[in-house]
Amino acid sequence: MSLSVISRMPPRFRFLRSGLSVAPEVSSTTWFFYKSLRNHIDTRNLHNYSEGCGNVFIRWFCNFPEPQILCWGGSSRDILLQKLEVKLRDHQVDDAWEVFNDFRKLYGYPERSVMCKLVNELSYSAESRWLRKAYGLVSGISKYKSNLPQNDVLAKLSLSLARAQMPIRATMILRLLDDKTSLTSVMNLVVLHLVKTKIGTVLASNFLIENCNCCGQVTTEDNPRRRKDWKLDTSCFNLVLDACVRFDSSFKGQQLIEAMALTGVVADAHSVIIIAQIHEMSGQRDELLKFKDQIHPVPVSLLHHYHIFYDCLLSLHFKFGDLDAASDLAIEVFKMGEELPITKLKKGSHKPFLIPIVSQNLKSGLKIQVLPDILHKDTVLKFATQHQLISYKNRRLVLSDRAVAKLIHGYKLAGRVNDLSKVVTRIHGEMSSSKEASFCSDIVNACLFSGWLETAHDIIDDMELAGTPMPYDAYMSLMSAYCKRKMLREATGLAHQIRKAGFNCDPSDEQFISTCFTDDNNQNNQLKSGLAESLVRETQLKKTSLSEIYKFNSSIYFFCKAKMIEDAVRSYRRMQAVNIHPTVQTFTSLLQGYASLGMYREMTVLWGDIKRRLASESLPPNRDLFELLLSSFIRGGYFELVLDIICCMKKQSMFIDRQLHKHEFLKIHKDLYRNLKASMARTEAQSKRLHLVQEFRNWAGIS
């Protein structure tokens, strides 16, 4: 074996063979080359050539105690690459990184195959520092598309970053993928780790929405990012939708529902439940009723799952102040149970139902595909077991005490006690005989516990007129209340009513007297129940015109989706005229309506209204609202307002997805003022705009 590397040295370095001192013209790069080469020379072979090379050469290369063996059959580049591959094969990450740094300083980045091995090895490391180095490595060479690791390697790196709770880095790697087929196999796992945090949920939802919009658009020269090769998965959407519910991001949830409809992803039974929760959070009762038309009546085998759906729907009925709809649903709930025959599947139920979004009368409206009977048992989703209005017990749906209390209180406030009695009578008829008496007694006792003696007596009268017998305990509870308040005329009339009902009511009876004049503590204990306490809490709640807010928001949402912006604005003005404060839902609907028509100037006026309400604290800060404004103003080119919103979000310590807005800017304003210098501005306004655009470029990291 010959020392071929010496013969290939540049002429100015052959002084080493004659033992000359170092020449002053040697460059720093050359010094680094020999210093790096010294670390890899086999000094045991080198001593065989010591006489011909000179003492200076020996002193230069052989001053370390433990020399390493290396073949001299190739160039230093090949030697470093070979050693790097050996270190990677032996999983010596520290040594491999050191060799890689030596190679990069001399020759730049290695071939793509070597980069794939290096990034893959770093991705499997359990230490976060190596994951950060892998991300930095990929990010640094991202501008050289030919040198990027393969897509499957990038997908694995994204999964490792997501598992290590580095959501920003994980989604950055996802955006670098130019072939989504590699992502399909790991996307669910990536999302599973991303949605554990609020920031990860924002990034995951933005990534899905952005790519779904690309998939749903027509491929053109201006839109090369359309990807038909990415097969979107229902489970992936369910994970992100559930996270939107957990982190109170109903607007993101609505965008994801529309993305499912746009890309043809079929919603299953889990999707229906999460969609119901999102519509309940947004106050969109009409949207939820469309789902009820398709899934009702629910088979007995799925009652344990769909009780959440009915809980959300009943909650919306109460929010809208629709007592009749709430009563009808309550009665339907009591009809569902194991005693009923198993519901037959609807004709064609094996095919997805098409449920329109907003309205089926809109020609341009989207429709989401739903298979309500598909329930995957291997899901990782865990829905809340405690629900406020409807629960599942003993293979039946059961109204909670709070639901019944809301019905009682709602009818009482509306002065519709007769209608309440009719509802109680209908529910009484649907209940089992063992629970009939206790249900009626609980309602009467709850009214008495709240001090509503007249209401309790009216319910008893109406039940008697309807032919529904009341239990003796209900009469005696009311009689005791009358006696305690010394309402002798009412007590006398009730005594006659009790005798007419076939019960003994003799004033000379000691038991009857003792019952009527029981002390207050004992009476309260007798009347006290879960329903009574729920009714008291319901009466103590501060009542506002919430139903009017939901009705206005529902109208504005419909008008904006139908592109009837003038009607939406009229509803908004009327809302203000009756002194009803707009909510986040109000503004998001209006902003979406304006954005769909490209009316960005009108959005600037609405932003002024939002700022005033934020300052007066009548509107809570909302990240989704700010993000919608930010994206819209970037598209409209209002960069002064863009920077203003960024400042507001920073003050509220809100996370901003810079990559989302960077992409939005490059898609529309890629060459805006790119080659124009401040000195070239013709007017002061142009100079100011140039400064604002440049400031945004700096913030977004656009060179």
Image: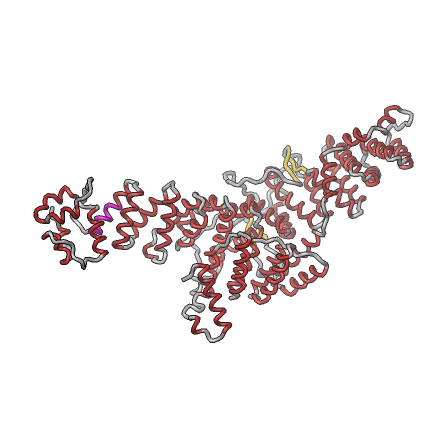
Please state which of residues 157 and 689 is positioned toward the viewer in this rendering. 689
Res. 349 visible in picture: no
**Total marks placed:** 0
Q: Position of residue 459 (x, y in %)?
A: 81, 39
Which image quadrant: the C terminus? bottom left
State which quadrant residue 495 falls in. top right
State how the image is colored: secondary structure
- In the figure, residue 574 lies in which quadrant? bottom right
- Residue in front for this viewpoint, 54 or 106: 54
Query: What percent of the width, then of the height, locates residue 665?
Result: 47, 62
Q: Where 373 falls versus 695 (above or below)?
A: above
Q: Residue at x 20, y 46 (%)?
A: 40
Q: Main secondary structure of the magenta part?
A: helix
Foreground residue among 686 and 323: 686
Q: Residue furthest top?
A: 510
Residue 519 image-quadrant placement: top right
Q: In the image, which residues are magenta?
A: 76-84
Instruction: Residue at 50% x, 39% y: name it.
Output: 378
Magenta region includes residue 255: no
The structure residue drawn at horizontal position 65% and vertical position 55%, both measured from the top left corner, is: 618
Left or right position of 650 against 442: left
Going 38% across and 40% down the picture, which residue do you hit? 126
Relative to 608, 34 lies left or right: left
Task: Provide residue 669's location: percent of width, then percent of height.
Answer: 46, 66
* Farthest-out residue, left: 51
Residue 601 in view of the camera: yes
Q: Position of residue 38 (x, y in %)?
A: 19, 47
